[in-house]
Image (cartoon, rainbow, N blue to C red):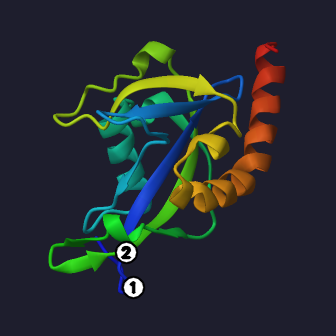
Amino acid sequence: MLDADGYRLNIGIVIANGRGDVLWAKRVRQDGWQFPQGGMQEGESQQQAMYRELEEETGLKPEQVEIWGTTRDWLRYRLPKKMIRPTKGKVCIGQKQKWYLLRLLSEDSAVQLDRSHSPEFDRWEWVSYWYPLDQIVDFKRGVYQRMLKELSSIHAQKVARYTRASGTK
């Protein structure tokens, strides 16, 4: 689904564990790593798209996560010229993303990257919250920086609360 300016409407997902680490996933048949994300479909709300993408890309169901927060506004990035392609007769120039910060309520084993007929990722790991900034492809770095900065206070507050409540360090 493209907006009038040629940006594909997209949902991004950051999944944190109780220690505050975040799920970082490697794309199938590529060297690139990223957070789960995917395009919205016609008629879907942002939250419906998030839950659909969550299940398609990680195998997690709504009851296995808790929503900690979301970005206020859409964040955009332009694709490099070599990646710009027509989509259903329109030209997609980039992504327009709303990001969700979630906490995994289940065991790590609940993450199943091969649940969809066309898996996006073949590996994942827990990394520190800011680690992805130095790892993400250049053209997405600005969005990751804005998103992580915006969600960082929610992340820190929720991790501190969870850590106190569970007695973990």
Residue 107 in the image: above or below residue 117: above
Query: Few, some or many C-alpha atoms within 10 Å of disc 2 (few <14, some 14-19, many ≥20)?
Result: many
Question: Where residue 10 sits in the image (x, y, percent)?
Answer: 40, 61
Q: Would you name the residue on which mark 1 appears?
A: 5
Residue at coordinates 74% horizontally, 54% vertically from top-left?
149
Residue at coordinates 48% horizontally, 52% vertically from top-left?
12
Q: For residue 118, what is the image quadrant?
A: top left
Question: Where residue 94 sits in the image (x, y, percent)?
Answer: 41, 70
For the image shown, how many numbered marks are present on the structure?
2
Q: Would you name the residue on which mark 2 appears?
A: 93
Q: Quadrant of the N terminus?
A: bottom left
Left or right of 162 in this view: 61 = left
Residue 12 in the image: above or below residue 14: below
Q: Residue furthest front?
A: 82
Q: Nearer the viewer, residue 118 or 137?
A: 137
Tag 2's secondary structure? loop
**Marks 1 & 2, CB-CB < 8 Å contact:** yes
Residue 100 in the image: above or below residue 104: below
Q: Which of the two discs, 1 and 2, labels the residue nearer the N terminus?
A: 1
Q: For residue 115, what is the image quadrant?
A: top left
Left or right of 15 in this view: 56 = left
Question: Where residue 54 sits in the image (x, y, percent)?
Answer: 39, 40
Amino acid carrying mark 1 in the image:
Asp
Amino acid carrying mark 2 in the image:
Ile
Query: Few, some or many C-alpha atoms within 10 Å of disc 1 (few <14, some 14-19, many ≥20)?
Result: few
Q: Give the mark toward the camera: 1 or 2.
A: 2
Question: Where residue 18 sits in the image (x, y, percent)?
Answer: 67, 24
Tag 1's secondary structure? loop
